Image (tube, grey):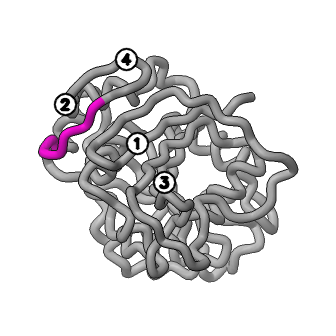
Amino acid sequence: MGAVRIDCLLPLPASDLSDDAISALYDRADRSVPWLRVNFVSSADGAAAVDGVSGGLGTDADHRIFDLLRELCDVVIVGAGTVRSEGYGAMVLPPASAARRVARGLPAHPVFAIVSNSLTLDPASPIFTEAPVRPIVVTTEAAPHDRRTALAAVADVLIAGQQQLDPSILVAALAERGLTQQHCEGGPSLFGSLLAAGAVDELCLTVSPQLVAGDAKRIAAGALASPRDLALSQVLVSGDTLLLRYELRR
């Protein structure tokens, strides 16, 4: 990290930000207050993926922010479908990132929380077997009990809802474990359900300088009772890439 130049336009102009300066912009002053941040990348025409994965949209600046946001959180939350499609492994941060976390008084690695209704996860996956911190699998009462038992051997199984995920239970249960700074990396279905429940506090959105067209998904799927208003709190720029930060208005 640190190779690609990132400048700040809002809240105060600043040039060629260091990793420490960027982290200071995103860090929360009071970590005792639960806060759910969601991070996405989209094309200029609103596509959340190219050929089914978001990796084709990422730029060097997006990757830099992606890594720095992981350094600041207590838990990284990802839907199981995104874990599979994006090829997630164990939640292991690079040594420099782990060292910066420890210097802040945090564990070297954040907890990895995977959300799955069906529990079609392999307990023998490196996600679990190579995890530096015991992962959490978030599911519902309706999930198959044999799958819950199998996964309980390699992860903490957290029940958050009856038939469908209840985001309010998810946020509260993680906070009760001391995981107050919650960072969600998608996918669109999970983001949509979190939005519908009013659980999201912040959206970090990278606008990639590409046009995708076609029928690619947007960053949020599903229906909302009404549109959610956003307050723009930060604008970073790196070449042609915009890195935006919004807080959801209550």
> Is 48 left, or right, of 64 in this rendering?
right
Q: Position of residue 216 (x, y in %)?
A: 57, 74
| Spatial CA span between label 3 and label 4 | 23 Å
Which residue corresponds to mark 2? Answer: 16
Q: Which mark sits nearer the N-terminus, 3 or 4?
A: 4
3 vs 4, front mark: 4
1 vs 3, front mark: 1
Q: Residue at x 25, y 37 (%)?
A: 6
Q: Inspect this view and state whether residue 91 appears.
A: yes
> Hey, what amino acid is under mark 1?
Leu
CB atoms at circles 4 and 2 under 8 Å apart?
no
Q: Quadrant of residue 70?
A: top left
| Spatial CA span between label 1 and label 3 | 10 Å
Q: Which mark sits nearer the N-terminus, 1 or 3?
A: 3
Which residue corresponds to mark 1? Answer: 243
Residue sitting farthest toward the right:
225
Q: Which mark sits nearer the N-terminus, 2 or 1?
A: 2
Q: Residue at x 69, y 57 (%)?
A: 192
> Hey, what amino acid is under mark 2?
Asp
Magenta span includes 5: yes
| Spatial CA span between label 4 and label 2 | 13 Å
Which residue corresponds to mark 3? Answer: 40
Q: Position of residue 85 (x, y in %)?
A: 45, 77
> Hey, what amino acid is under mark 3?
Phe
| Spatial CA span between label 2 and label 1 | 14 Å
Q: Residue at x 33, y 28 (%)?
A: 8
> In terms of secondary structure, where does tag 1 sit?
strand
